[in-house]
Amino acid sequence: MPIEYLKKADLTSESGAGDVRELVQGILDDIEQGGDEAALKYAAKFDKYEGNIVLTKEEIEAACDKVPQKLKEDIQFAHANVKRFAEAQMSTLSDVECEIVPGLLAGQKSIPVNAAGCYVPGGRYSHIASAIMTVTTAKVAGCDNIVVCSPPRPEIGIAPAIIYAAHIAGADEILALGGVQGVAAMAFGLFGQPEANILVGPGNQFVAEAKRILFGRVGIDMFAGPTDSLVLADSTADPLIAAVDLVGQAEHGYNSPVWLVTDDRAVAEKVMELVPGLIADLPPVNSENAFKAWRDYAEVILCDTREEMAATSDSYAPEHLTVQAEDLDWWQDRLSCYGSLFLGEETTVAFGDKASGTNHVLPTSGAANYTGGLSVHKYMKIVTWQRATRDGCKPIAEATARISRLEGMEGHARSADIRLKKYFPNEEFDLSANG
């Protein structure tokens, strides 16, 4: 039988987003033309902040001193885990060299980008973990310049814990700028910073749109929408744990989709029974977000088989995918479209979001169909090179000349011709298109 929706979403993550492109484009144009002064104008307007933009060493030290010791230890723990995993990823990159034909060597080399701009949200929630995730991976990748921008709070500045996390992770500079003006400052190299080669990190729809507009001029980690999560649960799943995990991800925002896919009706119905009470028990701001996300965007899907469950999950390509089911090896081998996978109830998305080591900057809105999340690889340029002896270039030049003429690209053909004439003056070559 076809899959059954026990709860169907009224909206999608794109519903009601509005067209912010014109607004964001206008701000970017204004800041590019007006430089530091224009960025300061928008900081005063949107951040309600007129303090120092580029944090001094003394300001960073003062902020770090305000962070409780236990929180420092937790941040250090999370940083160590993210760093360890990033270093393991880095070890998978190796330079390559091979002989294509006798006398022609070609190779591949991994080179980190020079300047990384890391955006760390600090509005409704202080995203301490985002500072760890973005800066640590850039540092391990070998970026020479790492700049962090994070929204300051009126009359206060950036949350001390964000400053501490960015500092120990290896940020070279920390700027008290949020929103489009923060993204622009990193992209355009304002306040004495180098122009960023890549912009990374989560943010609201204005931050996401600014990155989208700037893509091509700079690299970005990915096009990001509202965070989303899917739980796969069979009859062995604990409905309370599944419900808590869904609610925990729904608190991200009013338009953050969460989905439950199961082959057990009793599990589905129990989860649906538990969720409203769990939402009501959250603090007011969190509860409001989770309530709207569950009401408008959540879905509960009943399938016949685990294969149908897996196929449904792959069709959603969720940012976060949790499996609470038997035979975890089967699921790990079968599933193919997700940002990050959490196998078994002993793991949870919250672990990956905060401290377990894998990165929490992940593809949303189905982008997991074609890309993965932030990693050291995102900061690397995979470039190629070649080198040849004169004998090695001979067959390549002959083929290049004939293919080029067949394509009508005579200038290309002559670049091959001249080498053959110089290196092999006593030989005859048929370099016509029909040679």
Image: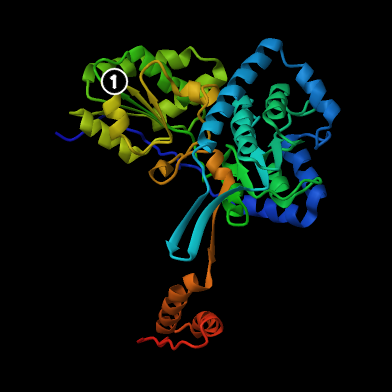
Residue 153 location, quadrant: top right
Give the mark count: 1
Residue at 62% across, 57% down: 217
Point out the residue furthest to the front here. 426
Residue 38 or residue 8, whichever sits in front: 38
Residue 109 or residue 349, whichever sits in front: 109
Give the percent coordinates (x, y) of residue 144.
70, 43
Q: How is the image coloured?
A: rainbow
Specify whether 374 is left or right of 44.
Answer: left
Specify whether 94 is left or right of 306.
Answer: right
Q: What residue is shown with label 1?
A: 325
Specify whether 204 is left or right of 97.
Answer: right
Give the percent coordinates (x, y) of residue 335.
31, 34
Point out the residue furthest to the left here. 1
Specify whether 343 is left or right of 222.
Answer: left
Q: Residues within 10 Å of mark 1 (few under 14, many from 20)?
A: many
The answer to whether residue 35 is seen in the rendering is yes
Give the percent coordinates (x, y) of residue 262.
26, 25
Residue at 63% across, 25% down: 128
The answer to whether residue 209 is seen in the rendering is no
Query: Is 75 above or below relative to 57?
Result: above
Residue at 54% across, 80% down: 423
Give the percent coordinates (x, y) of residue 75.
63, 20
Residue 137 or residue 240, whichever sits in front: 137
The N terminus: image quadrant: top left
Residue at 70% across, 37% down: 149
Q: In what element is the residue under mark 1? A: loop
The C terminus: image quadrant: bottom left
Q: Which residue type carries mark 1?
A: Ala
